[in-house]
Image (cartoon, helix red, strand yellow):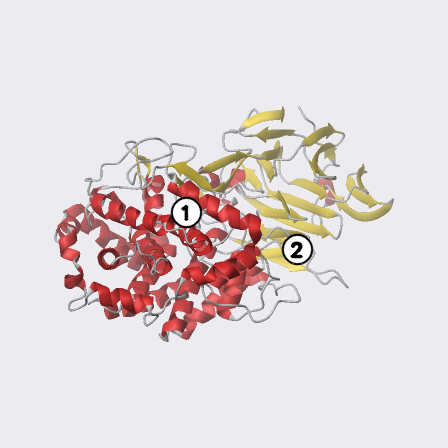
Amino acid sequence: MAKIGTMLQVGRTFGMRDGMLRLEYELQRGSGLMSWRMRSVQGWDSWDLQRVAPGIRAEEMLATRRDGASRFFFTDAQTLGTNIRKIIGLDREKTVLAEAERILAGNIPFFGQLSFACDFPPQWFRNPATGQSVSPRQPWTQMRFASPAYGDLKFILEPSRFLFVYPLVRAYALSGDERFPQAFWTAIEDWALHSPPMAGPLWICGQECSLRILAWSFALHGFVNSPSTTNERASLLVSMIAAHAWRTAQTLGYARSQRSNHLISEAVGLWTAGTLYPELREAKVWQTLGGRLLQEAVLDQITIEGVSQQHSFNYQRMILHLLLWTLRLAEIHHVPLPDEISMRTQAAFEFMHAWVDPESGFAPNYGSDDGSQILPLTVSQYRDFRPLLQLGAAVLDRPALKPGHWDEAALWFGAKPTTVEETAPALPPSAETGYFRLGDQSSWALIRAGRYTRRPFQADQLHVDLWWRGINLARDAGTYLYNAPPPWNNGLAGTAVHNTVTVDHHDQMRRAGRFLWVDWAQASGRSHSSPGQPYADRFEGEHDGYKRFGVTHHRMVQWLAGSGWVIVDDMEGTGVHDLCLHWLAADLPYQVSDSPFQVTFTAGQSRVQWSIFASSMGNAAIIRAGVRVEGNSADTDTQLLGWESPTYGDLRPAVSIIYQTRSQLPVRFVTAVLTDERCKLESIDGEIVILRNESEVYRAKVSEKGTRPAEAYPSAVRVPIA
């Protein structure tokens, strides 16, 4: 019966329309119909230029791009070199050239900030992380994204996104070195030789095909005036783009059923092929279809407040890159797009702007992150969102950041911000978005407390991120891998690794698959500003993810201006339960004391004090890289704790701080994170008192507030290191 109930919930999660679209796709794969359709157009002869663009000669097609009659973001990449140097400076120019040299030496960038030795041209069918390979003759219609034979297919597909062409074009603009365009064309010819149309694993995904269309189009226009760009090569590339657009159009039902960035990517790929290559016979069809699907996807996936329904900051960046690409090309080509696309793009941009740390440029590592950085036109780090903000400001005509090396992407788009913002961006309405921000520009917190109307991807209600002077003190663990043996098969999506409380060792929601949750936890919250305080400084909220155990989690977060934060967690209900409060901190040097339990981190010349109190005696522990290094965690599986993943496939040590207790409810936890060394914390008669220069800053009971009797909670107890 439980299995039937789960199946019914899964059905309700996808809904009738999406379920039927996915069923149709799987039936086509399983019946062999999809294989037959792919076999009917295999071989590059089926995609010869005279077939896909009747009456068009390659030399004419290339000439229209060289003379600017067929427009792109820029007409000649090399004319941008001087301005790029002004933006990035000499040292960063050397960095760009060094990256291009590494690519030619066979070190290919992966997932925004990793690289693997793949040779050049890359070994297209080899997983560089494991050394495994997939057969180039294996039909994609019979494959999945993970297999014991080849591991995680994402590692095999990444070089075929051709994201390495963006650094090559940038290096060419700076140096004029003809090795870079020659390397691109060598890679194109090699890819075409080893991956004939529709035939093998590199054709498995319409999204991958669409991202190749964007990268190849950028490279064609970047290298258009190079002697390496011959009529024959341009003819081959445009034929390949036509094949990719056709392939993308064959599985749109699957993309629509996902209701994710897949559909936006594929719509933009089709629209780009139709807009940039009007010579193609199907150009108008693809442009119209892409525009219609993009409107559908944007209205479906981006709320009026600008929140991506995937609830992932990295995927929101990816979506914004795709939308900004489309809006800018539409402006250049005078192609009308529905106003809703521009309006939702602007809302998504403003929402994202609110979560970029002003000092570091980083955004919280919140939500699923597969390492997508589809427009690597910057020397900035992978998690630096300032290039996105500057590009968005230029394309959408919004106030920009102050100039910096993050201006380069906007330069490549042929756009320039008109004004520089003088004040911090306006925050989106918290209650409507489900994301709450406390604090000022240098000391702030993110709290997630939302209501899901679409399937969630992580069980993380009431998660808290803490930022101070550009340091992400309390952080999200990221993703690491989707396709791997347990516990790394999207294991960092669970509640236990987020900065919240687990009950009886369970997630807030019930897991029904790697990417599927049922029994959705719903949360509500509200933020407040103290009198005379220009920023919100207090959050209160709760979620019902543990109602199946008769437990409700209330959380209060208080920002202490200039001093830090206090977080109060009340676990209410009946019965005896195992409770575990978890915090994931930066991997900084630390010291531990036990009177009360306190972890003092050292960040440069500063110290941050992390203290935990509870109304019920328990045990505290510190776990780093999956290993308990302090305290007692006998009842806790530590494999996933004390890790963070800055990007896909990259796992690094972090510091997990946990407090466990088995107790009759209600139970209260109080966490104090103090960033001002003048502050001290005292425990007095069941209360904690925070003092700064002997003046009281904050006082909190380790007992419930409101109408509940205070005697229901014992006095504060210090948390021992057992």
Query: Which residue is denoted by mark 2 in the rendering?
Result: 438
Q: Is residue 400 above or below residue 141?
A: below
190 or 450: nearer the eye? 190
The circle on residue 518 is 1
Tell me residue 268's x, y (percent).
Answer: 35, 62
Which residue is rendered at x = 26% and y = 69% of the image? Answer: 278
Is the residue marked by circle 1 packed among few (<14), some (14-19), or many (20+) residues within 10 Å?
many
389 or 685: nearer the eye? 389
Which residue is rendered at x = 41% and y = 46% of the image? Answer: 517
Is the residue marked by circle 2 packed among few (<14), some (14-19), or many (20+) residues within 10 Å?
many
Which residue is rendered at x = 59% and y = 53% of the image? Answer: 361
Secondary structure under badge 2?
strand
Tell me residue 134's x, y (percent).
Answer: 26, 36
Secondary structure under badge 1?
strand
Using residue 718 as the reference point, say whether residue 211 is left or right of it: left
Using residue 684 as the reference point, say whether residue 352 is left or right of it: left
Residue 627 figure quarter = top right
In the picture, which quadrant includes the N terminus?
top left
Q: Please state which amino acid type lies under the numbered disc 2.
A: Leu
Q: Is residue 587 above or below residue 323?
A: above
Q: CA distance from mark 2 to mark 1?
A: 30 Å
In the picture, which quadrant includes the C terminus?
top right
Q: Is residue 485 above or below residue 702?
A: above
Using residue 309 as the reference point, say whether residue 602 is left or right of it: right
